[in-house]
Amino acid sequence: MKIEFPKLDTDLGRVKLPCQVQPKYDGELAVWLPEQGVLTNRYGTEKVLPLCKELPNIELVGELYWDTGKRNFYQALPKLKQHDPLLKFAVFGMYHTDMTFSEQMKILKLAIQNSDRVSVVEGHNAYSHPELEHYLKDNLKQGWEGSVVKPLMSSSFTSWVKNKPDETIDLLILGVSKKKSAIAVGTPDGKILGHCSLLGQPEIAALVGKENIIGDTKEDYLISPSYAIEVKHLGVIEPSGCLRNPRISRLREDLGKDNL
C-alpha cells in the first residue's frame, strides 16, 4: 500500500475559511495503519512503539515527537529508543476519509483517550486572516514552530497550509542537481545545507548552466562557488544544520565567496 503524506503549502492565500489553527510541532510526520500495527514515516520506515497500543482502530495521520515537540526532535533522534517515555504521538486527523476536518475531530475526541503518549491536537477556530496571524503569534510565543491551518469543511490533506515565519540567510551556490531542477546551496567551506528549486528562476539556471563542473556527489554536479544568493527557509534541522524548505529569494550580486 502506497502511503500519501500531506505536502504542506506555505501560501496563506490558499486558506479556506473557516479553519482550525493548530500548533506546528517539531517532529516526524507519520501515518498509523491499524491493520499493520505500525507507524510509518514519509520515507517508508515502520515503527512499532509502545504507544501504538493506545491508538484506535482508525487510520490516522499525526506527528511523532519528543518531549514538548518544540524544536528538539532531530536533536534527540540519534539517542531515541522505542521505549523512551518522552516519545509521543500527536493526532492531526483521519487518514483517507471523506469526512470534513470538523467531523473528523468530533470522532477522534471520542475515539482517543488523551494520555501522556497519545493526544488529539487542540486548535482554535479562525474566521478571518487577522485571526490566523493572532494565533500564529500566540503559537510562536509559546515556543512552537508556527501553525498548521486546516479548513473545517475540507477532507483533503492538500488544503492544509503551514504558517511559519520565513528566515533568510546568504549562501553560495555549490552545485546543480543531476536532474538540473535545483541548486545546492551552502557555506564557503563547501558544506551543502540544502537544495532550492530552479522552477521560475531562469536567470540563475542560466548562470549555473555556464559553470564548469569541478566534481560531483550522488545528487549534484559541483561547480566553483562564484555566486551568492539570499535563501528563505523555515528554520534549521538539528543536528545536521540543514535548512527546512529552502527557497531562492534573490541573487546577491554584491556578495561572493570572500565576503560571506
Image (cartoon, helix red, strand yellow):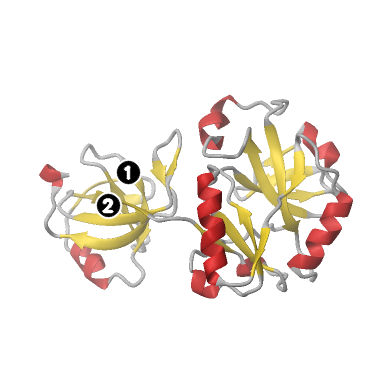
Residue 247 % position (x, y): 36, 59
State the image quarter where residue 65 is shown. top right
Q: Nearer the viewer, residue 118 or 128?
A: 128
Q: Residue at x 62, y 70 (%)?
A: 159
Image quarter of the N terminus = bottom right
Please say if the residues under marks 1 and 2 sit with CB atoms less than 8 Å apart: yes
18 horizontally vs 222: left or right: right
Q: Nearer the viewer, residue 70 or 256?
A: 70
Q: Nearer the viewer, residue 34 or 8?
A: 8
Image quarter of the C terminus = top left
At label 1, the amino acid type is Ile
Q: Residue at x 76, y 64 (%)?
A: 96
- Real-space Cα distance between discs 1 and 2? 9 Å
Secondary structure at numbered mark 2: strand
State the image quarter where residue 4 is shown. bottom right
At label 2, the amino acid type is Gly
Residue 29 % position (x, y): 63, 49
Residue 104 in sight from this viewpoint:
yes
* Residue matched to label 2: 175
Q: Residue at x 33, y 65 (%)?
A: 198
Q: Residues within 10 Å of mark 1 (few under 14, many from 20)?
A: some
Residue 57 in sight from this viewpoint:
no
In this view, the mark in front (1 or 2): 1
Q: Is residue 76 above or below residue 61?
A: above
Q: Earlier in the sequence, mark 1 or mark 2?
A: 2
Secondary structure at numbered mark 1: strand
* Residue matched to label 1: 192
Residue 52 % position (x, y): 80, 39
119 horizontally vs 142: left or right: right
